[in-house]
Amino acid sequence: MIYLDNSATTSIAHEVYEAMIPFLTSEFGNPSSKYYPQATAAKDAVEESRYWVAKLLHAKPEEIIFTAGATESSNMIIKGVADYQKYYENKGNHIITSLVEHHATLNTCKFLNGDIYSNQDATFSLSGEPRKVDRGYEVTFLGVNEFAQVTLDSFEQAIRSSTVLASFIWANNEIGSLNDIAGLADIAHRHGVLIHVDGTQVVGKLPINLQEVPADFLSLSAHKLHGPKGIGAAFIRGDDYGLPPMSSYMHGGEQEQGLRAGTLSVHNIVGFGKAAELAFHNAEQTQKALLDLDTEVRALITQHKKLELLGNPEQHVPGIFSIIVHDASFNNERFIKSISSDFALSTGSACTAGMPSHVLKAIGRSEDVSRVLRLSLTEVDTVESVNALIEKLN
């Protein structure tokens, strides 16, 4: 099996697996309990992991809140900030995002905007009529350029006096284009607007220094950098007084500074910490290998007349390739099914399987939805694997 779907999930590193085992067996304590060895060992392990996740991002440990993954982090940040800013600070109710966000952001904003109540059915109601409800928020969904990037001008023009939060994806999970996060953050702060960044596809692939990139919030998942599934983190920028106030996402106990109640998943947190530690120590080697591989694969793909690469050719995260196959007889779903015993790849985001790509629609390529393949690689993959796939296409 040649695995080419690393944007969906990466394989777990052996060191990560080994680090998790004790916390599934002998070290089974609850880190919120007190005094006895299993509890203190669990708490110490959680804090060590928090240290490594923070170090990877060039953040402070107290700015890292563990969640079940980037989807939960994005929900927690967008809903928590919007609620607090509107109802407790009286600053406004307006949010800005884009049409090409991951559905964790897109559907959260649609929910706040009153467009949906469920991820599966946006229009059903017991009355039988499509309904839009007033939840007290207004959301602007910005269009993008041909590379699925938010332009600085369009963002600045959309800001109102009531705008409290903007949320943008750093690297598009379908076509790989990078947004100018530093530029977007500068504009947001100039207008007194907070900014959340979905960094899921960037962490571990490109350097991230949150001392230099002034994002207020960032979401990430462990399973995108050889960690376990079901664990992620929210970066929340603090100051001399601690974290900024925001409404809790999970109400209950006081875990995670009162923002995310519930017993911590210690074994997953330990795995996340080990994955972050490995990513930090191997950053230079990993990023060089991935950039070299990206250059080789792009050259291989672009030499084929029937293959077209989407996304910005310069401003993209290395390792994500969205390819249109220009052949009238080609159907991506049938092709992927026919080679599924030998190759793992996708037509786009794993979170929107079975749905037309909103990203392709936003960049004016809806007619190509049945001809798109997404390959996503890590630093350990080879150009020979991609060449083998292209031979299958031929």
Image (cartoon, helix red, strand yellow):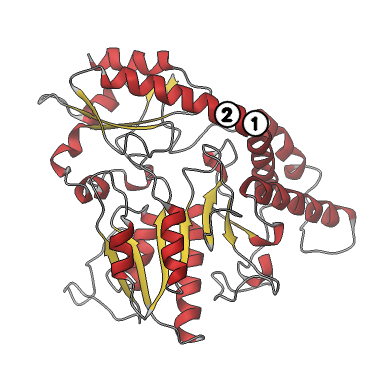
- The image quarter containing residue 133 is bottom left
Q: Quadrant of the N terminus?
A: top left
- Mark 1: few/some/many CA within 10 Å (<14, 14-19, 20+): few
In the rendered view, does 203 fall on the left or right side of 24? left
The total of numbered circles placed on residues is 2
Q: Which of 362 and 182 is in front in this view?
A: 182
Q: Is mark 1 on a helix, strand or loop?
A: loop
Q: Which residue is drawn at 63% across and 73% down?
A: 252
In the rendered view, does 280 fall on the left or right side of 294? right
Q: Nearer the viewer, residue 163 or 222?
A: 163
**How far from the left and from the top, in percent, is residue 186?**
46, 62
Q: Which amino acid does label 1 sit on?
A: Asn
**How far from the left and from the top, in percent, is residue 204?**
56, 39
Q: Which residue is drawn at 76% across and 54% down?
A: 47
- Residue 286: mark: 2
Q: Which of 87 and 192 is in front in this view?
A: 192
Q: Are marks 1 and 2 in contact (CB under 8 Å)?
A: yes
- The image quarter containing residue 305 is top left
Q: In which quarter of the image is the C terminus?
A: top left
- Mark 2: few/some/many CA within 10 Å (<14, 14-19, 20+): some
- Residue 2: mark: none
In the rendered view, does 342 fall on the left or right side of 354? right
Q: Can residue 248 be seen in this view?
A: yes
Q: Is residue 118 visible?
A: no
Q: Which amino acid does label 2 sit on?
A: Thr
How far apart are the alpha carbons under marks 1 and 2? Answer: 6 Å
- Residue 282: mark: 1
